[in-house]
């Protein structure tokens, strides 16, 4: 894991994002004219809005890749989905849809195209296959896992059920298809509080994120017993409340009214120190709202991709302060992996799941869609 942070003793408080990934040179891209490459490079640079980190030369180097990917998508009728944590050359260069897990699973289900290419980690591509079993789902980086989804197995769920008979099992979307198949309802970081609140019964098992489990225990104290599994996201676990307190002290000393926005996969001390908590998409929207109201000094306590998105989506000047952390799994995928999977996917880049696993896991996801809609209409 690569942490991107400032020396707290330095005078510069502005966030430093990881450098732009240059093409590895593993593929020979299709041939495009100098004019086409120049136009594409300018389109990329204007969409990404980080002219130093994504210089025109960098954009020229990746332009042949984005041009060919976009041509192949049209030719092969592919819908390309990217999670917010992917790099900006993917999210703003080639993706048809960019969002967090909940919105993306709906997009995968509703897209008219019969082929989905999911640029993200494995459990998300599996989720796309569960909600669209008849579609071809391509995942360019089969090795891209996740510390949450890789830390729990279907057997763990069966053991928990045996230890706590009768308690419904709620799984965070960051789980494998096999784990979802053992659970009663799936949740995401944008709906987990509400769904756990309305589930009947006086106890539930929450897997696999121990921090989100702890937030549930705090939120539902006295109403429900929450049995929590011991997993964590290695990226969000790296943030601490002390770091935020230090940054607040430094910024207050120079007259900055810092707004801190955090992801719920962080621990309770971080959440306590934050002004706002939400999923990556909700965090981005809140950041844009704050900036449009003149609050330009923000600290985003989450994966670096969210900062890239806020910069690209904002028309105002903003000042992102502090540190972000890069997820090595999310950043595994590069444009060349996407191009290779579109040209000629290897067998391991095609998501295949047992029909029985798909059927049982889809019940778990359908319950999430049903309860999310129910809670939206009931409150
Ligand atoms: S950011 Fe955390 S939860 Fe998301 S893929 Fe990376 S390790 Fe998993």
Image (cartoon, helix red, strand yellow):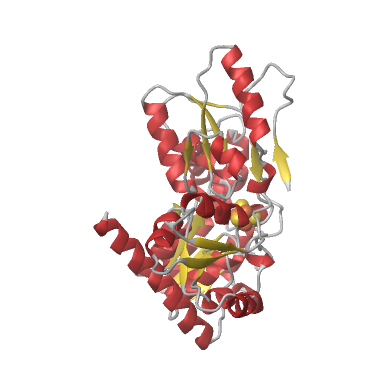
Residue drawn at x 62%, y 39% is 58
Of residues 376 and 67, the one drawn nearer to the viewer in this rendering: 376
User: Looking at the rendering, in which quadrant would you find the C terminus?
Assistant: bottom left
Residue drawn at x 61%, y 72% is 349
Residue drawn at x 49%, y 74% is 129
How far across and how far down the image is residue 266, in percent? Answer: 60, 46
Q: Quadrant of residue 338?
A: bottom right
The picture quadrant for ligand 1 comes to bottom right
Numbered circles on residues, count: 0
Residue drawn at x 45%, y 74% is 364
Of residues 289 and 239, the one drawn nearer to the viewer in this rendering: 239
Q: Is residue 112 visible?
A: yes
With respect to residue 303, does 371 lie above or below? below
- Which residue is situated farthest in the left direction here? 377
Of residues 379 and 108, the one drawn nearer to the viewer in this rendering: 379
With respect to residue 321, does 75 lie above or below? below
Q: In the shown orientation, is residue 378 left or right of residue 11?
A: left
With respect to residue 145, does 350 lie above or below? below
Q: Quadrant of residue 197?
A: bottom left
How far across and how far down the image is residue 96, in percent? Answer: 42, 56
Q: Quadrant of residue 55?
A: top right
How far across and how far down the image is residue 281, in percent? Answer: 45, 47
With respect to residue 43, does 85 lie above or below? below
- Which residue is situated farthest in the top direction here? 254
Of residues 175 and 37, the one drawn nearer to the viewer in this rendering: 175
Q: In the shown orientation, is residue 240 left or right of residue 198?
A: right
């Amino acid at each position: 894991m690569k942490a991107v942070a400032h020396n707290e003793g330095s005078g510069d408080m502005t966030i430093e994002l990881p450098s732009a990934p240059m093409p590895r040179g593993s593929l020979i891209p299709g041939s495009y004219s100098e004019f086409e490459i120049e136009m594409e490079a300018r389109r990329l640079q204007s969409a990404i809005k980080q002219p130093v980190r994504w210089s025109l030369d960098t954009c020229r180097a990746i332009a042949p890749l984005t041009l060919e990917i976009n041509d192949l998508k049209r030719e092969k009728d592919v819908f390309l989905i990217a999670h917010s944590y992917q790099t900006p050359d993917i999210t703003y260069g080639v993706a048809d849809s960019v969002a967090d897990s909940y919105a993306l699973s709906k997009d995968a289900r509703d897209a008219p195209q019969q082929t989905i290419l999911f640029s993200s980690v494995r459990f998300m591509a599996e989720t796309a296959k569960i909600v669209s079993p008849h579609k071809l789902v391509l995942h360019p980086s089969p090795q891209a896992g996740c510390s949450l989804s890789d830390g729990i197995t279907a057997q763990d769920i069966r053991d928990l059920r045996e230890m706590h008979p009768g308690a419904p099992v709620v799984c965070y979307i960051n789980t494998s298809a096999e784990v979802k198949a053992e659970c009663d309802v799936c949740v995401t970081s944008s709906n987990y509080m509400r769904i756990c609140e309305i589930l009947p019964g006086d106890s539930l098992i929450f897997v696999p994120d121990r921090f989100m489990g702890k937030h549930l225990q705090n939120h539902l104290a006295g109403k429900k017993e929450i049995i929590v599994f011991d997993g964590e996201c290695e990226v969000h676990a790296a943030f601490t409340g002390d770091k935020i307190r230090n940054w607040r002290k430094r910024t207050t000393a120079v007259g900055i009214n810092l707004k801190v926005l955090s992801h719920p996969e962080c621990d309770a001390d971080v959440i306590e120190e934050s002004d706002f908590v939400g999923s990556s998409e909700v965090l981005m929207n809140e950041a844009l709202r704050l900036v449009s109201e003149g609050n330009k000094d923000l600290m985003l306590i989450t994966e670096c991709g969210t900062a890239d998105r806020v910069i690209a989506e904002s028309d105002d000047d903003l000042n992102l302060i502090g540190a972000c952390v890069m997820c090595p799994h999310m950043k595994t995928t590069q444009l060349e992996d996407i191009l290779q999977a579109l040209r000629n996917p290897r067998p391991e880049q095609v998501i295949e799941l047992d029909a029985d696993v798909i059927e049982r896991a889809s019940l778990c996801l359908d319950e999430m869609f049903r309860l999310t809609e129910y809670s939206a209409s009931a409150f």
